[in-house]
Amino acid sequence: MNFKTVGSPLARSGGLERVTGQQKYVADIKLPSMLESKLVTIDSAHAKILSIDISEAQKVDGVLLVMTANDLPHPVPRFGPQIEDRPVLADKEVKFHGEPVALVVAETIEAAKQAACLVHVQYKELPAIFSVEKALDPSAPLVMDPFLRPNDPKSNTNVFNEHRYGWGEIDESKADIVVENTYSFPMVTHFCIEPHAFIAAPDKDGIAIWSTIQHPYWLQKIIAKLLKLPLSKVRVFAPDPGGGFGGKQHTKYEPALAFAALKLGRPVRLVLTLEESFQAVRRTSCETHIRTGFSKHGRIIFQDIIANYLLGAYVDIADRVVGKGSYAGAGPYNTPAVRILARSILSHTSPATAFRGFGNPEINWAVESNIDEAARLLGIDRLEIRLRNLAKKGDRFIPYDKPADGDWQQTVIKAAELIGWNKPPDPSHHRGIAVGIKLGPTTGLSYSLVRLLADGSAILACGTSDMGQGARSVFAQIVSEELGVPYENIQVVMGDTATVLYDQQTSASRSTVLMGNSILKACYSIHSQLKIKLARAYQIEESQISIDHGIVKFPDHEEEIPKIIKTVLGSLGGEIIGVGEERKEGEKNHPLGGSACFYEFNCTAVDIEVDEKTGDIIIARYATVSDVGKSINSMQVHMQDEGAAVQALGHTLMEHYIFDEKGRIRNLGAADYKIPTTMDLPKEFLSETVENLDGPGPYGAKGMSEGALLCVSSAVASAVSEAIGTTIRDLPLTPERVWQAIHLQK
Amino acid sequence: MAKPIPIEINIDNRNYRLEVSPSMRLLDLLREKLDFTATKECCSIGECGACTVLVNGRAVDSCLMLAAEADGATILTAEGLSQDGHLNDLQEAFLEKGAVQCGFCTPGQLISATYLLSHNPHPSREEVEEGMAGNLCRCGCYERIIDAVISVSEKNGGEK
């Protein structure tokens, strides 16, 4: 296929606004007569609220409202994407460090901040649960009130849900060795450089919300239900978020702002501090106990996995994270017998939510590390043991799901070559390699609207959120390819539920595939309309006209679409409108409610040195290879994979919440919670793709951008084990931990 | 209320004469009072670099400086980088090299890079890494940001 724009490394659509500072994020928006607000929190992870005295706060000049749960309808309205467990403001009890007990609204942010300090909350501290072990103790206090889940036999425990998957019979006698270990994955936060921000404003007889949200239509549904308004009266504006990574998928403090704005009849804004965003969102931490049986030839005989994921005080989307993240837990291997038990465990911590990789990196860390250990015990090369077990294209490696949809061997071999696996490393260098797999979306619904205008330019409206992944560019390239409109003449409109057609959500690396297909269909609809109109204009049969990649082919000549649009539209001008709809229906009896649309597959290989004196890990060379089916924008694909790698180096080497004995986070904010900087990069950074045009998206594309994060910890840790001769099974691999591992064995 | 302080300040080639409260940060003056929203707020404690501006040619975290301290100063924000509607070399390079994902850290990155190149026009890769280490990018564009800075240095005559 000859592409004109698809596949090209075109500069980011929306890039111009971003390098000139013109891009408006939510916190940059000012509405007339807008009020400012501040959350009131207490310094406790779990407490019974005895009283809230707002009298002093109300006296502060400019304060208009100090809203507590008492000012809300009774019972206190609750919401959540999976279960409606989260109160709009703390309801008699604070269940995590940073849960807001009140919202102060004032004319200025200074007044709101000052008044927030003067809200006096009397509370009784209660024991806080912030570890798997404590949460599972039968004497532990219950995090979730049992009335929220009637008829659930687990409601008298802190286990919210248990997910069980598997096939085959686990038979230890057939395994020559069984490797059994426990691995822990830390509690980390998204740390978007743009902290969450929200505005709520009365809008005639409805409400308008501006939010840094990834899923505006889901927010619209939740607000409509809470305020008892029709969907049509809830307008959500979702300007491009400044990073999301999953942490901006779901509703957080928008409901509280909505109630306040309606009460006061004026717009109210809330911009979180970075510290508050740390308390608002985090990744599920996880302890994985794993037993893997191998034949002496390195064949995996069975995987027996118990993964205990720690959720926060409210479920958010985290139980889905656990269910979907553990589902492919046995990895991309042909495994005869698998038993997976993944638990969603509640605790008095920040509500865990989606985070790039959606529960998969947590379990990948255990599975891939165990394979390394077996390779060492059996004397088999770590690349070789993976290739012996890796599913081939078409293999049903999960018996009841989509078969392997890529030549994954090609990906692994490419990564191995990039790192020079078959050549001995430089003296003092050590290598690691690992693979990761993740299911794409299991259901989906994306509409799009393409308008071909009278001058041959085009406007695309679609409900995807472009939070940095570059969806605008990818979609504009598809429209450009199909309609022949120059890339720079395409305007992409997003982020307004009143004017942009419905899209289910921006998650699971779905948008290139599902929205991409929707946009293709919208373009094909324009092709059909063009053919009808052209047949009429030229008095020929419709069947004598074909359209291919923006070129109209007549029996005797060819024309680019923009060149003939005037002929088609006539003297009145106007436009041709194409609507696209792409559905991925659920499947009733499927354990996840639907099979995988595609798999994201990645292989990461590293070459490292360990400084034995300091415990520092220096990454000399880093190779990441993803099977993306087809790159629509080759530069952006590499940008995503490099970014995923850097983000994963964070939870691999340095990031983790630190709690005190009462469950309060002690390292809130940028000074005490370290993320990678320019000083933490691999010395040599290689990113490659495998493109066999075998994905379900436009031109054979698969979803991507999460894959390159999945197995980074395992690859790095594998190299570290080689270097120091002992294995660390707790992330992150901080210098302190590595130093101790080196020196404690001596 | 403490007495407002009169200041004169030049921001992106525009002169302002106004009164600020003694506790107002330079960042608030820019973003809230004068609507220079290119300059972003993230960590508020001088760790992330999102609010970096040039004050009399030096890179400063505007969350750590009081507006009153900027009396008489010349400020450059990312909004002042384009000249006559044309992107400058750094802005072009950021787009060309793919150094922009979500874009929230970009204004601060551009200003830090401007400062780096102003006092070290031909930095080595290590010097760029060090010079840009105060600007966090959670999208992980670092490699490309460094490439962009080096490409501008090379365009201006030079490899070290």
Image (tube, rainbow, N blue to C red):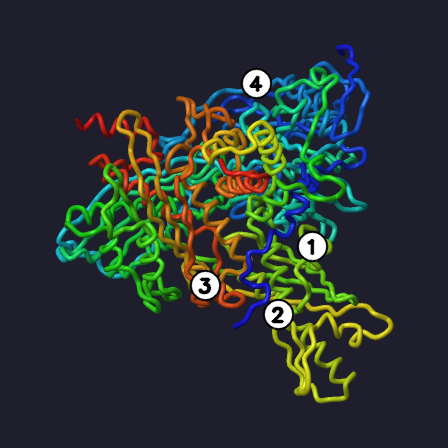
Q: Are marks 4 and 2 on the same chain?
A: yes
Q: Residues within 10 Å of mark 2 (few under 14, many from 20)?
A: many
> Badge 3 sits on which subunit?
A
Count of numbered circles on the image: 4
Marks 2 and 1, how far apart at CA:
18 Å
The numbered mark at residue A122 is 4
The kind of residue tagged 1 is: Val
Evaluate whether residue A145 shows in this view: no
The kind of residue tagged 4 is: Gln
The kind of residue tagged 3 is: Gly
**Residue B94 or residue A449, whichever sits in front:** B94
Nearer-N-terminus badge (3/4)? 4
Could you say whether the residue bearing mark 2 is in a helix, strand or loop? helix
> Badge 1 sits on which subunit?
A
Residue carrying label 1: A493
Nearer-N-terminus badge (4/2)? 4
Marks 4 and 2, how far apart at CA:
59 Å
